[in-house]
Image (tube, rainbow, N blue to C red):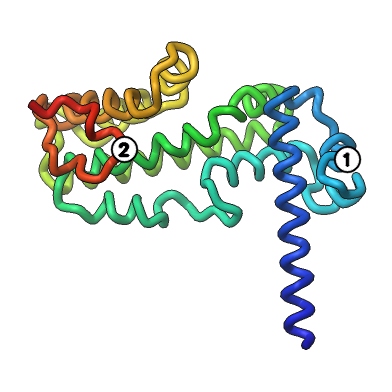
Amino acid sequence: MTDVKARTRAERARETRRRMRDAARELFVSQGYADTTMKQIAADAGVAVQTVYYTFKTKGALLCEVAEVTAAGEDDPVPVSRRAWMREAMAVPSTQRTIALVVEHGSGIYERVAVLWPAVNAAAAADPEVDEYWRGVAANRRSGQHAFVARIAELGGLRSELDVGRATDIVVVLCGHDVYRGLVLDAGWTVPDYKAWLFTTLIQQLLGHRQPDPEALRGLSYAPLVDAS
């Protein structure tokens, strides 16, 4: 009976935490970071403001958790390197399939979290806690992209004139927030159009291939938009 009660308390705590995150996300998106207060978040989540402070300590820490959970698309985020799609991308023997999987699922992260970028950028400029978090996100992203490029090099697919460091620089820029924002949010491209462009650009830049392999795109959302003729 004690275990059942403990699990029930834990489940209630997780649900309360989720409600607070959801309320915070809506407010951060609709009115920005500076204009959102912990009192508003508490009211929208149906809890006392002391509960929000007890759980998250600061508004900056709450925003960081909201961004982390939103980007992952799950309540208990695991590092990208441990997600099933990345493990598959790092295990397949095809360089184009590796790139195709990273484009499919890596772009999905941006698709989920892009609405929070204005709040995160504004908070990072004013709150050292958020700035440190955002710098850590950038460092982790580069580390992951370096591992991805190293895998392509291991498979013997990297263009002869590129080393892993230079290729990583290219990937960091092409797969960066600014390119996604410029093409999808500002120019109005669909996400599948962006993915198709990114895949074809990466295989040209990293592999020197101008001919996409249809098999590498099997089962992916943007496959019909890639010209493999």
Q: Is residue 54 left or right of residue 218?
A: right
Residue ID at (41%, 55%): 83
Distance from disc 1 to disc 2, alpha carbons, whole Å, reads 39 Å
Q: Position of residue 99 (x, y in %)?
A: 25, 39
Q: Position of residue 155 (x, y in %)?
A: 14, 47
- Which residue lies under the disc numbered 2? 221
**Is 162 in front, or is 83?**
83
- Badge 2 amino acid: Ser
Please tell me whether mark 2 sits on a helix, a strand or a loop: loop
Residue ID at (47%, 38%): 109
How many C-alpha atoms fall within 10 Å of the one at disc 2: few (<14), some, or many (≥20)? few
**Is 209 in front, or is 189?**
189
Q: Is residue 79 left or right of residue 62?
A: left
Q: Is residue 196 left or right of residue 115?
A: left
Query: In the rendered view of the protein, which quadrant contains the C terminus?
Result: top left
Q: Position of residue 17 (x, y in %)?
A: 74, 53
Query: In the rendered view of the protein, which quadrant contains the N terminus?
Result: bottom right
Q: Position of residue 202 (x, y in %)?
A: 23, 28
Q: Quadrant of residue 174?
A: top left
- Badge 1 amino acid: Ala
- Which residue lies under the disc numbered 1? 43
